[in-house]
Image: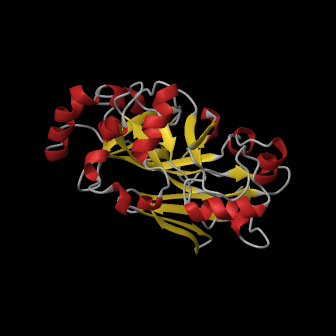
Amino acid sequence: MRFATFSKDGACSVALQTSTGAQLDLTAAGIADDMLSLISRWARIKDRLESLMADPGNCPEIPAGSRRVAPIPDPRRNIFCVGKNYREHAKEFGQSGFDGGATGGNEVPDYPIVFSKATTSVIGPDAPVPSSADPFGTVDYEGELGVIIGTGGKAIDRSTAAQHVFGYTIINDVTAREVQKLHKQWVLGKGADGFCPMGPAIVTADEIADVDALRLTTHVNGELRQDALVGDLIFDIAVLIETISRYITLLPGDIIATGTPAGVGIGFDPPRFLRPGDTVTVAISGIGELRNPID
């Protein structure tokens, strides 16, 4: 199934998209107040939703004039993010001179590098990214697959990690590179308000036959910059879930941004940072496109 969140007049509604493209308003139907409640109640409402897919009946649709926002516009806590999780990106980042992380250099990390983006960094499709948040003019893009946790847990083993995945979305891990470099860590440079575009929807895990076969691309003003398969991850989704849950209990609705492939702006010589008026489009096969202008 495919779920999205829409906003109108300051109120949000959760939508279930049917095979015909209709957006059924699950909030108006009294099924889910928001995406987090849908995920938490998934086992109890899944059968009802499957019935709606087959026969929408009298379920209302999202009102005309509604605006699509991030699938989880107000996460319960910071987004878990993973750095240097594609080999070629680890190399380009290490050679760029902007590596403020603890590992340094251009070597592939021995363990997942985990940091976070603030909840206030989340914006939806077509929402402008505020480049003014970076006073140095070094705003960069990072297209990533986002994993949405369904059933939470502590010390989850990688062999059962797939059972804890609710679905997938697209994330752009926007980064202020000079801020990242100056502070020698990644939270401030990546967690600024408006620096986490997300969407356009969440596709449930059962819709993705082989997550490793998903193709991720990023275009800037129509120019292809990133192109990779999720299967190229250094640490796959199961390892990431196992690693994070070893120390932090995962909760329903938690979001994990799995890392970005090579082709980011700092990988060019000279770097090709984003400027006001640019448009970044991150696409993942089977999920859709996330497009955001740079303000």
- Residue 45 visible in the shown view: yes
Name the residue located 50 percent from the left edge and 55 percent from the top edge: 234
Nearest to the observer: residue 27 or residue 271: 271
Please identify the quarter of the rendering in which residue 82 is found: top right
Name the residue located 43 percent from the left edge and 50 percent from the top edge: 236
Q: Is residue 257 left or right of residue 61?
A: right
Q: Position of residue 209 (x, y in %)?
A: 26, 56
Nearest to the observer: residue 290 or residue 17: 290
Q: Position of residue 86 (x, y in %)?
A: 55, 59
- Residue 57 visible in the shown view: no
Total number of numbered discs in the rendering: 0
Name the residue located 24 percent from the left edge and 56 percent from the top edge: 20
Q: Position of residue 178 (x, y in %)?
A: 81, 52
Q: Is residue 104 left or right of residue 49?
A: right
Nearest to the observer: residue 170 or residue 268: 268
Q: Quadrant of the C terminus?
A: bottom right
Q: Is residue 27 above or below residue 240?
A: above
Q: Is residue 271 left or right of residue 205?
A: right
Please identify the quarter of the rendering in which residue 137 is found: bottom right
